[in-house]
Amino acid sequence: MTEIFISNANPETKNLLMKCLETAGFEVFSTDNGLVRVHLAQEKSSTTGESTKSNTPQSIFPSIPRLHEVFEFIELNYYQRISLKEVAQEVGYSSAYLTDLVRRLTGKTVNDWIIERRIAQACTLLLSTNDSVNQIALQVGYQNINHFYCQFRDYHSTTPHAWREAQRCQLGQNKIHKIL
């Protein structure tokens, strides 16, 4: 369990922080006088001495032991240009075998998982920063901004900017409802 102390935070900032923590895979246990108690969902059965390789969520990936190395490689490299061939080489499979294995076990392709991880991180950054959509697209591994917009729209049926505004508006409405 981890404790985070929030001092002098307005309610909107506090709610945004809570949403970011939940998006990052933390479960919030309590909030008392500025002290927030959280833990990573995957830490429930792990020892406290374990360290994670990344501070970003891996919860989008299913827990399939045969694909652990695949998902770990994607997690560690999604923000740069990576291909099916590179993932396959890293885990010691041919591209064709890896494609078949991942699709059979998850119903998605390796490329689908790379895109999903990038979009998930883009959403986290859209909510937690004021970086421009173009900056965020570059940060999560897109070299072509238009390609990012198309893929984001495929996942969320709206543009990144409109999604950000809608999510922030919803967070504000949730705050109002909690006060009432």
Image: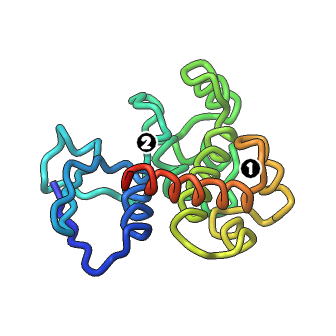
Most distant residue in the right direction: 146
The residue under label 1 is 152
Q: Position of residue 61 (x, y in %)?
A: 48, 38
- Given residues 146 and 8, the one toward you in this image is 8
Q: Which of labels 1 and 2 is toward the front?
A: 1
**Mark 1 touches mark 2? (CB < 8 Å):** no
- Given residues 122 and 142, the one toward you in this image is 122
- Given residues 76 and 85, the one toward you in this image is 76
> Where is 135 relative to 150, above or below?
below
Residue shown at 57%/50% (left/top)? 120
Q: Position of residue 63 (x, y in %)?
A: 40, 31
Is residue 95 rendered to the left or right of residue 55? right
**Which mark, residue 124?**
none
Is residue 178 rendered to the left or right of residue 61? left
Residue shown at 51%/67% (left/top)? 128
Whether residue 78 is visible, yes or no, is no
Residue shown at 59%/28% (left/top)? 102
The residue under label 2 is 59
**Label 1 SS:** helix
> Where is 129 relative to 54, above or below?
below
> Where is 91 relative to 108, above or below?
below
Residue type at mark 2 is Ser
Q: Position of residue 46 (x, y in %)?
A: 18, 43
Q: Give the quadrant of the N terminus.
A: bottom left
Residue shown at 61%/40% (left/top)? 113
